[in-house]
């Protein structure tokens, strides 16, 4: 499964315990980013700390990972909250009726999250999948409008 931009930005790295490659040339910027990788802050926070753009931080992280100088700290990406889930079910129920819960479960399964929780970075993808299940154009439009508003409010866009 490919990671969304939000999930990549949420990754946390720490310096590896081993020595890594014996010969690896690093720029000052790479050294600064490596020094900031403490196993606590995610890539988004490293961007703020170092002042380096996210694309560069991701590229440096990939290079350091390939050189075995850092490792990913195993952590779950942040999940959508209960308020979002309840709002989604309510809006889907208004759009398609009592089958909403089953349709949402099927869509979650299609996204690879059958037991939940749904990562925040995949919330917009879920909304898109669900909107395709709404046959009446006016209901689909209302669902999309309401859900985009909630996604923006929650900051769940990737």
Image: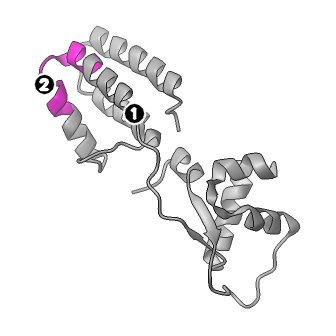
**Element class at badge 2:** loop
Q: Residue at x 15, y 32 (%)?
A: 102
Mark count: 2
Q: In the rendered structure, which disc, 2 or 1, sits on the residue that comes first in sequence?
A: 1
> Is residue 65 depicted above or below 20 in this figure?
above
Residue in front for this viewpoint, 56 or 36: 36
Say the numbered circle drawn on residue 99: 2
Q: Residue at x 62, y 58 (%)?
A: 40
Q: Residue at x 35, y 35 (%)?
A: 126
Q: In the figure, residue 76 lies in which quadrant?
A: bottom left
Q: Residue under label 1, please give it.
A: 81
- Write down the region rendered in magenta: 91-103
As for residue 95 lying within the magenta part, the answer is yes
Which image quadrant: the N terminus? bottom left
As for residue 51 lying within the magenta part, the answer is no
Q: Residue furthest right?
A: 28
């Amino acid at each position: 499964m490919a990671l969304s931009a939000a999930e990549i930005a949420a990754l946390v790295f720490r310096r590896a315990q081993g020595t890594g490659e014996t010969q690896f040339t690093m720029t000052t910027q790479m050294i600064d980013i490596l020094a900031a990788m403490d196993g606590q802050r995610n890539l988004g926070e490293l961007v703020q700390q170092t002042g380096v753009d996210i694309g560069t931080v991701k590229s440096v992280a990939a290079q350091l990972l390939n050189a075995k100088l850092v490792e990913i700290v195993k952590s779950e990406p942040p999940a959508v909250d209960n308020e979002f889930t309840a709002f989604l079910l309510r809006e889907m129920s208004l759009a398609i009726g009592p089958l909403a819960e089953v349709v949402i479960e099927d869509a979650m399964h299609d996204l690879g999250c059958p037991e939940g929780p749904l990562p925040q970075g995949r919330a917009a993808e879920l909304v898109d999948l669900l909107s395709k299940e709404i046959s009446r154009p006016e209901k689909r439009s209302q669902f999309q409008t309401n859900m985009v508003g909630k996604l923006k409010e929650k900051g769940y866009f990737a």
